Image (cartoon, helix red, strand yellow):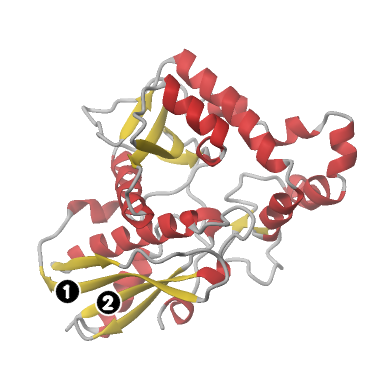
Amino acid sequence: MISRDVFETCVTRAALAPTVHNTQPARWVRDENVLSLFCDTNVGLTVGDPTGRDAALSCGAVLEAMMLALSAHQISAEVTLTGKDTAPNQGLVAVAHLKLSDGTKDGLHAQLEHRFTWRAAFAPGPVKLFGWTRSDARFVMDEAGRTWLAERNDWASFQIMRQDGFRKELVNWMRLSDAHPRAGLDGMDRASMQMSATEARMAPFALVKFWRFLNAFGLTKGLVSEHNVTLTAPLIALFHADNSENPVASGRAYLRMCLEACSLGFAGWPMAALSDNLTTNAQVCERFGIAPDRRLVQVIRFGIPTGEATARARRPLSDVIR
């Protein structure tokens, strides 16, 4: 049976995986040599993720991080996915069960502490892939392709941000002050979003209170534009999966891609609007030859960061272990 100390160490490391808006929905239960992963759907995004697909993807990333963390202790696991719906407001939903056994170390586990999201400009110049490729990702490196993706991303982001409910939900997950009651625990803080103190103070007013006024004067597109910063990314990855694949499984593969990129010195910055918007999702698939039996899961910018990672906001073990 896995010891409590090893279990808690692995849960802590698994929590380093990225989750949408840093909601951290994964919860763990230990029963001798079986670990069960649950999704806390009460912390889901009711507007941004009404079907729970992003929550499942997030849990999948945490699941793969757990597998890697266990491997550092030469523990393997037979994983059974439940396939249960993870739509919001259902409470705890079991998504996977792990039956533990002896195993071998997966060297990719060493990247868990080094991976981070970089929401600013990347270092100039081409990147070296050293032969890195993936069958589930299309790598876009040419200027024309990256420029097109940058334009489409701005368009899709603006369409999504025009929804009042989405903007309010987004602001609700922002931790713009150290005095916020959830600061350091979850959500997106000012440092991780690369916001100045002034931008942080103004964000709730610009995105909620005065949005309609600013929009009437054509000022809101500039608020959401990432075009220039996007073009500093020398590599944009189009991550795709089989249409029938469980999103938890897709989340596992997505994390491995991000950790492989990290091993090359890259940080990533998701362009979720491109996959979330049905129009741009279809356009990206058509332009870059992603087959009809595949779905575009996520688009992510990769490059060499121009700064250090900020402190991670993470829930305490008492929240994550049940």
Please say whether residue 233 is visible from this viewpoint.
Answer: no
Question: Under tag 1, what secondary structure?
Answer: strand
Per the image, the residue denoted by label 2 is 35
Report helix, strand or loop for mark 2: strand
Residue 218 circle label:
none
**How many C-alpha atoms fall within 10 Å of the one at disc 2: few (<14), some, or many (≥20)?**
some
Q: Are marks 2 and 1 in contact (CB under 8 Å)?
A: yes
Q: Nearer the viewer, residue 264 or 250?
A: 250
- Quadrant location of the N terminus in the rendered image: bottom left
**What's the residue at 61%, 47% (across, down)?**
193
- Say whether residue 244 is left or right of residue 160: left
What residue sits 35% from the left and 43% below the top? Answer: 243
Q: Amino acid at mark 2?
A: Leu
Q: Residues within 10 Å of mark 1 (few under 14, many from 20)?
A: some
- Residue 1 vs residue 312: left or right? left
For the C terminus, give its image quadrant.
bottom left
Name the N-terminal-most of marks 2 and 1.
2
Residue 40 point in image, percent of width and height: 49, 72
Horizontal side of residue 11 vs 192, given as left or right: left
> What residue is drawn where x is 61% and y is 51%?
191
Please say if 99 is above or below 215: below
Residue 321: horizontal and vertical position, in percent?
40, 80
Q: Give residue 240's position: percent from left, percent from top.
A: 36, 38
Seen in the picture, residue 216 relative to 185 is either above or below; the reply is above
The residue type indicated by label 1 comes to Leu
Question: Of 185 and 59, which appears nearest the observer?
Answer: 59
Which quadrant of the view contains residue 98? bottom left
Residue 255 makes an appearance in the image = yes
Residue, disc 1: 100
User: Where residue 27 sits: x, y (%)?
Assistant: 42, 74
> Image quarter for residue 126?
top left
Give the residue at the far top of this rendering. 144
